[in-house]
Amino acid sequence: MANIQTYIDAILEAVYGEQVRSAIANAILAINDAAITSVVLGADNKLVITFEDGHTYTSASLKGDKGDTGQTGATGATGATGATGNGIASIELYSTSGSAKTYRITYTNGNHFDFVVTDGEVSAAELQQVADRVETVEGEVGNINAHLGFLGNNDVVGIQVDYENKTFTRLASAVGKTAGADFDGLTPFGGRRRCNVANDGTINAYYGDEGYTEDGSNGQVMVYQPKFYYLVTPIKFDKNTSGLGYHLRKANYYVSSNKYTGFKLHPAFYDANGNEVDYILLSAYEGSMWDASAEAYVNDSVDTSIAYASGDLLCSVAGKKPISGLRTGMGTKANFEAMSNNRGSGWHLETIKATSANQLLMIVEIGMMNTQTGIGRGIDSITDNSSYNCSSLTGSTASLGNGSGSAASTVNEKGGTETTETATGKVAVTYRGVENPWGNIWKHIQGVNIWGNGSMAGGQPYVCNDLSSFNESSHSGHYEGAGFTIPNASGYIKAMGYGNPDFDWLLMPSEIGGDSSLPVGDYCYVTSNLNGYKIALLGGAWTHGAGGGGFGWGCNYGVGYRSRSIGGRLLYVPTAPALN
């Protein structure tokens, strides 16, 4: 039996109604994982538990009485007084007898309910009773919500993704908003700004300032991303019967500039010492290369003799060719990390945590998972030539500044020949200053490995918890398992995975079966029955069409892999000031 104390704590600390329901569901799954196939919130807020033998048990409605008296409006009358709901006061181990442990749930009205766990299992009848006994929790939660004003906090925005029914619903203060100006007043979104950054991390100028440039003469072109807090609430999920963890069927995703109960600082906003930072700097442009020995930017489609050497730099500037793995000795994840580190402390190849932060903001703002529909196709339909890195030059979204959308035109380059493209599928896209989060060229993503032992479907993602300990061949030590496996076959994404709650921010798939539009609209490449390590690539390249996108994953290439269609991009994570 799983140690349920963590889940008990989660129930007691839960504040929002859906958070309470999620915590209870997680606890029940943990207590009796072997016997339960799914726990879902059904009609009329009833908890429906399905067991492996096919039987189902349905609780009473998880809905309490009305909340406290409403406040008097500016010119309106005082609202009617509602009855206070009866919630859970405590859950504790009450007694132990041999292998049997009795847990006691005590309610705010003084009543209590005991249930017994024997040899790691809770009987179906006892589980049904536990579910029934939580029916009044939401009344108490409603009162807390009223005092905290969650629904009235203008800085909390969210989206409900119903993967099963392929629908999307805006939540909290996102209701009634559309992408763009409606989100400009929210710091995680409107606070994003292109800027020029020196190698020591100093911000020299912001977009619109005198002296701001995009050619690298005043520093790298980066995007200032203010820190934010997030909450992910699984509403409905099914056990992954062919791998680890669960398939999300419905989940709520929230973002806020303030920390409310249940919200966590997004993991992208921790420095190398594990301390919180107020911002990170994403790259405005895909990585190009400054050759230190030649003292010039290089184009690997025409510069045939280039190879990585100490001092070479990964860059984020306009008007340059993204560097790839076309030439021997170039283009591995290790190469890109080294060229980033050469800039100084805090510089890295973009990490999975930074990638996830950008992904989460995108879906909350555009109100869907299909980024190609919500923002623009991007560069995904360029005619290929196997002799070259066929990616297009950076910088065609410069005129969009801190905004989102597609460029009017983009310059493609192959073997020294430049062509100005204007058609859909051939022009760059940007999301609030970050050009081509998908398309044009695959991006190496740092800090995540896929590993399997031959019986873990496409493998489990392992995430690095230390900015100085990246290793493509590790799934222990500084690398922690996400608690779910990616699909065992390649295809369009049907569901995102869920497992270890510490990685609820990780937006990687567990199941295929979707299409090029819904629920996600992106493709995932995997190795079936993975035995060993694979790296993670994001977004697709110049020929990937509708299969590319903000969630298009390539998880089928091995350690040290390089290709003419794979590049990377910079990230800067500042160091928090030392405490005196």
Image (cartoon, rainbow, N blue to C red):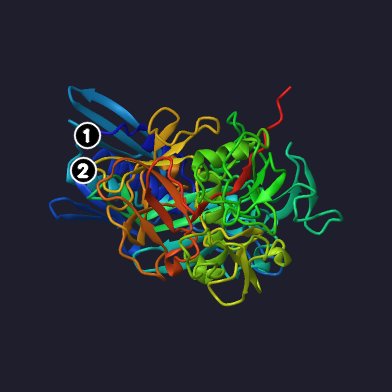
Residue 354 at x, y percent in the picture: 56, 46
Instruction: Determine if residue 264 is in view.
Output: no
Q: Position of residue 132 (x, y in %)?
A: 28, 50
Disc 2 marks which residue? 126
Residue 116 is marked as 1
Viewport quadrant of the N terminus:
top left
User: In the image shown, does 369 or 145 lie closer to the viewer?
Assistant: 369
Horizontal and vertical percent for residue 442? 49, 55
Query: Which percent across, then down, holds residue 530?
Result: 28, 44
Q: Quadrant of residue 397?
A: bottom right
Residue farthest toward the bottom in the current orientation of the protein: 423
Residue at (17% x, 22% y) in the render: 98
Tell me if I can see residue 203 in this picture. Answer: yes
What's the distance in space between the residues labelled 1 and 2, CA to CA? 8 Å
Q: Residue at the left extreme?
A: 53
Q: Residues within 10 Å of mark 1 (few under 14, many from 20)?
A: many
Which comes before the other along the chain, label 1 or label 2?
A: 1
Give the answer, above or below, for where 117 lies relative to 316: above
Give the residue drawn at x 66%, y 33%: 345
**Quarter residue 42 falls in:** bottom left
Q: Is residue 24 above or below residue 70?
A: above
What SS does tag 2 mark?
helix
Q: Taking 246 as reference, is 67 left or right?
A: right
Which residue type does callout 1 highlight? Val
* Amino acid on which disc 2 is placed: Glu
Q: Residue at x 36, y 56 (%)?
A: 525
